Image: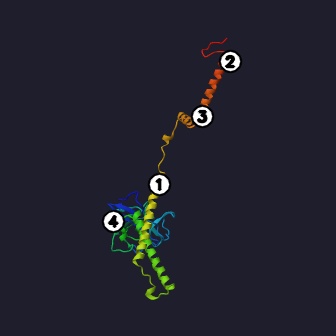
């Protein structure tokens, strides 16, 4: 069973993880058909062998081909979706060259990967069957491939990948320390023989381990800080809490500007004085009686 969201050339099945990306090769795997023709195959990428008169468009990626007497026969196009079938981990290739003497039939193949821990390298594919049996008429091939890369493996995550990087960095630093110390002993101190070789003490190893530990801690801190920044950037302000009505804005402006209130009170006092003056000119007293 294959999942649509799997990484190319990987498969999760019943708690196990399979990854065939290590079988990608810069040079095609070459083996023979039962009739002695050369079979060129690659995994999860196009073949590097130049195809000749395959009958398929030039802009497609051929995953494998058989070099027959008068032309090349494409056994299928590149496919990166793995399936778990009864025989084992399977990669199906289809839409290859037109089958000889058949209409609407095209070359295809089934590559069955079997887990074999006794095979140290990539292993070598073998044609188990072909149909029809005649080499020049064959249109479908079944290939068996024993390799330890078909065995379940642990899925490498961020932490495990960084640990591998840390180990490699530590080994490189150790080699540089040995080489530089040896050159210093030979050309500066003039030592010869075994005396020129660098001898690492316990102190040197502890210092190297401390350096790698600090490197790991700094990387973890950087990863955490970048995660916090991304989390803060994704927070959106509550826009509704900042929506004020025009009445609220007017009241806020009046409350925030004391000079405006003072000016209003001055205008009110001025109007009162003017009214008092007008009453005096018309000869009226406080009760409204006209003076004689």
Separation of disc 4 and disc 1 at Cα? 43 Å
Q: Earlier in the sequence, mark 2 or mark 3?
A: 3
For residue 195, above or below residue 79: below
State the mark number for residue 230: 1
Q: Which residue is mark 2?
A: 281
Q: Is residue 252 left or right of residue 19?
A: right
Name the element at disc 2. Answer: helix
| Label 1, label 3: how far apart the Cα atoms are | 46 Å
Give whichever of discs 2 and 4 has the lower sequence position. 4
Give the mark nearest the N terminus, 1 or 3: 1
Q: Residues within 10 Å of mark 3 (few under 14, many from 20)?
A: few
Marks 2 and 3 in Cβ contact (< 8 Å): no
| Spatial CA span between label 2 and label 3 | 32 Å
Q: Residue at horizontal 46%, vertical 77%?
A: 177
Give SS at disc 4.
loop
Pointer 1 and pointer 2: residues touching (CB < 8 Å)?
A: no
Residue behind mark 3:
260
Give x and y (percent) for residue 60: 49, 63
In depth, the one of 101 and 287 nearer the eye is: 287
- Reading the image, the residue beneath label 4 is 88
Question: Callout 2 environment at 10 Å: few (<14), some (14 to 19), or many (20+)?
Answer: few
């Amino acid at each position: 069973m294959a999942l649509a969201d799997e990484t190319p050339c990987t498969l999760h099945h019943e708690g196990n993880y399979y990854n065939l990306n290590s079988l990608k090769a810069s040079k095609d795997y070459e083996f023979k058909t039962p009739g002695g023709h050369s079979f060129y195959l690659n995994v999860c990428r196009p073949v590097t062998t130049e195809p000749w008169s395959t009958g398929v468009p030039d802009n497609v990626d051929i995953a494998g081909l058989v070099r027959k007497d008068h032309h090349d026969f494409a056994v299928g196009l590149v496919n990166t979706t793995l399936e778990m079938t009864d025989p084992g981990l399977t990669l199906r290739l289809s839409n290859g060259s037109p089958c000889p003497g058949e209409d609407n039939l095209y070359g295809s193949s089934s590559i069955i990967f079997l887990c074999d821990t006794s095979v140290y390298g990539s292993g070598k594919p073998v044609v188990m069957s072909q149909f029809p049996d005649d080499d020049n008429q064959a249109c479908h091939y079944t290939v068996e491939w024993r390799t330890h890369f078909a065995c379940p493996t642990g899925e490498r995550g961020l932490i495990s990948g960084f640990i591998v990087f840390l180990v490699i960095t530590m080994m490189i630093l150790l080699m540089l320390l040995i080489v530089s110390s040896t050159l210093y002993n030979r050309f500066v101190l003039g030592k010869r023989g075994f005396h020129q070789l660098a001898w690492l003490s316990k102190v040197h190893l502890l210092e190297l381990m401390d350096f790698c530990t600090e490197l790991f801690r700094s990387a973890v801190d950087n990863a955490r800080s970048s995660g916090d920044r991304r989390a803060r950037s994704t927070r959106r302000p509550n826009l509704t809490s900042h929506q004020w009505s025009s009445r609220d804005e007017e009241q806020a402006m009046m409350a925030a500007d004391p000079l405006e209130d003072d000016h209003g009170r001055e205008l009110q006092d001025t109007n009162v004085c003017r009214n008092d003056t007008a009453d005096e000119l018309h000869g009226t007293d406080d009760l409204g009686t006209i003076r004689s």
